[in-house]
Amino acid sequence: MGQTDVTSPNFREMLRAFAAIGVLSFGGPAAQIAMMHRVVVDEKRWISEPHFLHALNFCMLLPGPEAQQLATYIGWLLHGVRGGIAAGLLFVIPGLCVILGLSAAYALFQETTWLAGLFFGLKAAVLSIVIEAVIRIGRRALKTPLHRAVAASAFLALFLLALPFPLVVLAAGFIGYIGSRAAPGSAEQPASDAAPEGSRQSLQPLRGLAALIFWVAVWQAPLALLCVFGQDGLSTMFLFFSKMALVTFGGAYAVLAYVAQVAVEHYHWLQPGEMLDGLALAETTPGPLVLVLSFVGFLSGFRLPTGLDPLLAGVLGAMLAAWATFVPSFVWIFAGAPYIERLRGNRRLTAVLSAITAAVVGVILNLAVWFALHVLFAKVDRLTLWPQHGIASADGGGTFGTLSLAWPRLSSLDVEAVGISLLAAVLVFSARLGVAAVLTSCAATGLLLRLVF
C-alpha cells in the first residue's frame, strides 16, 4: 500500500475504532495485533504496512504490554498525545472492568467445587493457546537463519540459565546490529513512506525532557498517597509492579514468569496455581493479557492487612497494579516515538528491532514449556546442574547464571489435565475454533470432570 492510499481519520472516527478494538480484542497479543492491523491498515487505511511493522518492532523492544503500546503509538500517529492517550485507554479499560469482577468472584468463591473445576479446564486450554502463539509469532518473526538462532538462544538462556530478560534482549539487539554490519544487503527494507500528520512534530529536547519528568511524576503519584496513609503493604506491592514495568520485556508471557518467580516465591502473595488461574482469567477477557497483574494486585490487596474492607482493598490493589503497569507505556511512546519516527529509514535500527522480535519468540516458548510442566504435573522441581551457587537477583526472586533444569515428578502426572489439553489442541489446531469457543469447551469439560470425580 503506497502513501497515496493512506487517509487521515478525525478524532471521533478514531475513538469509535479503538473502542471496538478494546471490546473485541480477545486472544492475546498476537490476535490483538492482527486485529489492529486489519482495522488500521487493511480496512481504514490510516497507516501503511511498513509503518505498522516499524511501530510494532519498536513496541516489542519496550518493557510492558506491546499490544497496548502499539495502540498508543497508532493513536499518537493519528492525533498526537491526546490520540495516544485515548487509544491506549480504550484498549485497556473494557478488560480491566471485566477482570475486576472476575477477580472478586475468584477471591470470594475460590474454594467451591464448581469454580475449581472451571479453572482446571481453563488452565489446560491456555496451554494450547500459548503453544499456538509460539507458532503464529514465530512464522512472522523468524524469517532468516539468524533470527531462528536468536530465538533458540533466547529460549536456552531463559530456560536453562534463568538469565534476566533485559540482558537477553540487549544481546539480541547487539546481534542484529552486528549482523546488519556484516551483511548490510540482508537487512530488511526500511519504511520509506511519509508519516501521518499527527506524528509530524519538531524534536525539542528540553520540551521532551519536561514531558518525561511530568509523566514519571504522574506514574509515581499513588506511591506518595500510600505513604501518607501508612499503607506499607500496598506501597511495597506498588513499588514491585513499578520496578517490574521497567525490567520486564516481551509482554504478558514474559511478565508471568517474572511475577511467578517474585510475587509467589519471594513475597508469597499467592500460590503458583493461582498464577495460572489469573492468566486463564485474562485469556477470557478483552484487552492485553498483562491484565493478569491486576488479578495479582486484587488478591494481594484482598489478603494484605490494610485495615480496609477486603473487597475494597482488592479493588485498590488491582487499580494500583494497573496504574503501575500501563502508565509507563504512555511514557515510552510519547518520549521515544518522535525519535523512532525520524529513524524509520535506518536499516541498522530495523535489523536491531527485528532481532529483538525474534528473541521474544524464545521468551514465549519458555513460557509454553513452563505452562506445560505446571499444568500437566502437580510437582515440578528445579535441578541445579552447575555450579551450585549462582548470582543472586536484586529483587530476591532467586538466582540466575546457574545451569539448571525444571524437571517434573513423573508420578504427579495429572491424567485429566492431559486429556483436556489434548482436547484443546484438537480444537485449536484441527477445528481452528476461536479462543472463546476453546476456553468455553475446556472450562465446561473441567467443570464436569471435577463434579463427577
Image (tube, rainbow, N blue to C red):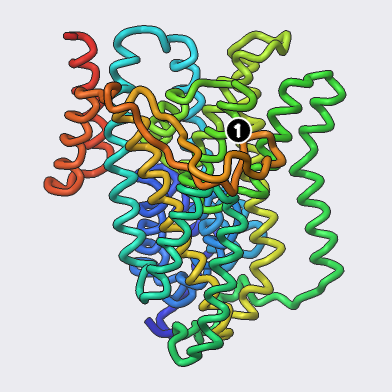
Q: Is residue 132 left or right of residue 235?
A: left
Q: Is residue 35 above or below residue 406?
A: below
Q: In the image, residue 197 lies at what x, y percent?
A: 59, 75
Q: Is residue 199 above or below residue 94?
A: below
Disc 1 packing (10 Å; few <14; some 14–19; many ≥20): some
Q: In this view, does 81 lie to the left or right of 102?
A: right
Q: Which of 105 and 399 is in front in this view?
A: 399
Residue at image position (30%, 22%) is 412
Q: In the image, residue 48 lies at what x, y percent?
A: 44, 76
Q: Which of 378 and 55 is in front in this view?
A: 378
Q: In the image, residue 330 lies at what x, y percent?
A: 65, 53
Provide the residue designation for mark 1.
262
Question: Residue 11 sits in which quadrant?
Answer: bottom right
Q: Nearer the viewer, residue 352 or 385?
A: 385
Residue at image position (27%, 22%) is 411
**Count of numbered badges drawn on the protein:** 1
Question: Residue 4 sits in which quadrant?
Answer: bottom left
